[in-house]
Image (tube, rainbow, N blue to C red):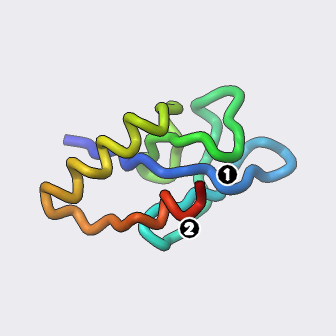
């Protein structure tokens, strides 16, 4: 089974190939090779360093809430970036 984590894009490099994402107080770079037209502020599902697709903020929030209920350690850092 694979797990993709919702994260918010906080920056995109000038080439548009990678994005800086934030979740739970942690920031990482991820590839945008699999999605088109990503923008700062978008939520994306991230798996092994790749943004798989964009999702709406409401869906991201619901998914993160379910993950918290299941005991996955995520915090409200994504909300701070709003």
Q: Mark 2 highlights which residue? A: 27
Query: Answer yes or no: do the residues labelled 2 and 1 have beta carbons within 8 Å?
Result: no
Q: Quick one: which residue is furthest to the right in this view?
A: 14
Distance Cα–Cα, label 2 vs label 1:
10 Å
Q: Is residue 19 left or right of residue 43?
A: right
Per the image, label 1 sits on a secondary structure element best described as strand
| Left/right of residue 42 with respect to residue 62 in the rendered view | right
Outermost bottom residue: 25
Q: Is residue 9 above or below residue 36?
A: below
Examine the rendered structure and indicate whether residue 26 appears above or below residue 59.
below
Pick the front one: 40 or 3? 40
Q: Residues within 10 Å of mark 2 (few under 14, many from 20)?
A: some
Pick the residue in front: 72 or 59: 59
| Residue appearing at x 19%, y 41% in the figure | 1
Residue at far left of view:
70
Q: Which residue is found at the position 49% from the left and 58% from the top?
A: 79
List x then y, in percent, for residue 8.
Answer: 55, 50
**Residue 19's disc number:** 1
Identity of the residue furthest to the top in this view: 36
Residue 76 at x, y = what percent? 40, 64
Query: Residue 82 versus residue 63: which sits nearer the camera?
Result: 82
Query: Which mark, by number, is residue 28?
Result: none
User: Badge 1: how crowded within 10 Å, few (<14), some, or many (20+)?
Assistant: many
Q: Residue at x 41, y 36 (%)?
A: 58
- Position of residue 49 measured from the top left corner of the image (x, y, whole percent): 50, 52
Left or right of 43: which side holds 37? right
Image quarter where the C terminus lies is bottom right
SS state under label 2:
strand
Q: Is 2 situated above or below 82? A: above
Q: Residue at x 84, y 45 (%)?
A: 15
First in sequence, mark 2 or 1: give its number.
1
């Amino acid at each position: 089974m694979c797990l993709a984590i919702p994260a918010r894009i906080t920056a995109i490099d000038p080439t548009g190939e990678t994005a800086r994402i934030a979740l739970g107080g942690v920031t990482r770079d991820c590839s945008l090779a699999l999605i088109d037209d990503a923008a700062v502020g978008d939520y994306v599902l991230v798996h092994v360093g790749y943004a798989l697709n964009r999702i709406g903020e409401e869906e991201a929030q619901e998914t993160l809430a379910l993950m918290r209920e299941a005991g996955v350690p995520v915090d409200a850092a994504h909300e701070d970036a709003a």
